[in-house]
Image (tube, rainbow, N blue to C red):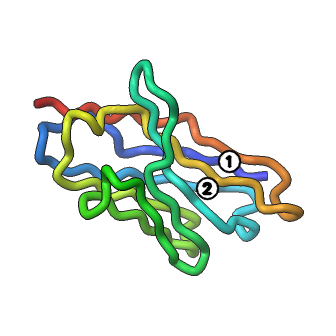
Amino acid sequence: QVQLVESGGGLVQAGGSLRLSCVASGSTSRINVIAWYRQAPGKQRELVASITTGGDTAYVDSVKGRFAISRDNAKSTAYLEMNSLKPEDTAVYYCHVPQNWPYLPFDSWGQGTQVIVSS
């Protein structure tokens, strides 16, 4: 299985930038997709960005052009570069590795890192 640890969250003013990191351990060679989700107070968790082993990326419309997801497979680390941050980006951000049957039979989630964007 895979264990995930996020870091890099914090308090930033609107228009600022943050870079989140997600370090994976365990069966990292079996990871295909890595994704970032976020959950704001009172809202459902939403998919923000994802990246495949081959480098294909996808983003929710609200962050396109502002956020960039990347990964360093040698370091078993994924990143989420967040620029031009807005107050509505405030949320707990989670790293996620979905199941990759049969190699990874279960989903994995990190503990989350808080991002607060002040106006």
Residue at (13% x, 40% y) in the render? 14
Q: Tell whether 36 sits left or right of 115.
A: right
The one of 30 and 45 positioned closer to us in this rendering: 45
Would you place residue 13 above or below residue 34 in this image?
above
Disc marking residue 24: 2
Q: Tell whether 115 sits left or right of 4.
A: left
Residue 65, percent from left and from top: 25, 63
- The answer to whether marks 1 and 2 mark residues whose Cβ atoms lie closer than 8 Å is yes
Whole-angstrom CA distance, mark 1 to mark 2, is 6 Å
Quarter of the rendering containing residue 70: bottom left
Residue at (58% x, 71% y) in the render? 52
The one of 33 and 26 positioned closer to us in this rendering: 33
Residue 28, percent from left and from top: 70, 64
Secondary structure beneath label 2: strand
Q: Amino acid at mark 2?
A: Ala
Would you place residue 63 above or below residue 100 in this image?
above
Q: Residue furthest right?
A: 102
Disc marking residue 3: 1
Residue at (51% x, 41% y) in the render? 94
Secondary structure beneath label 1: strand
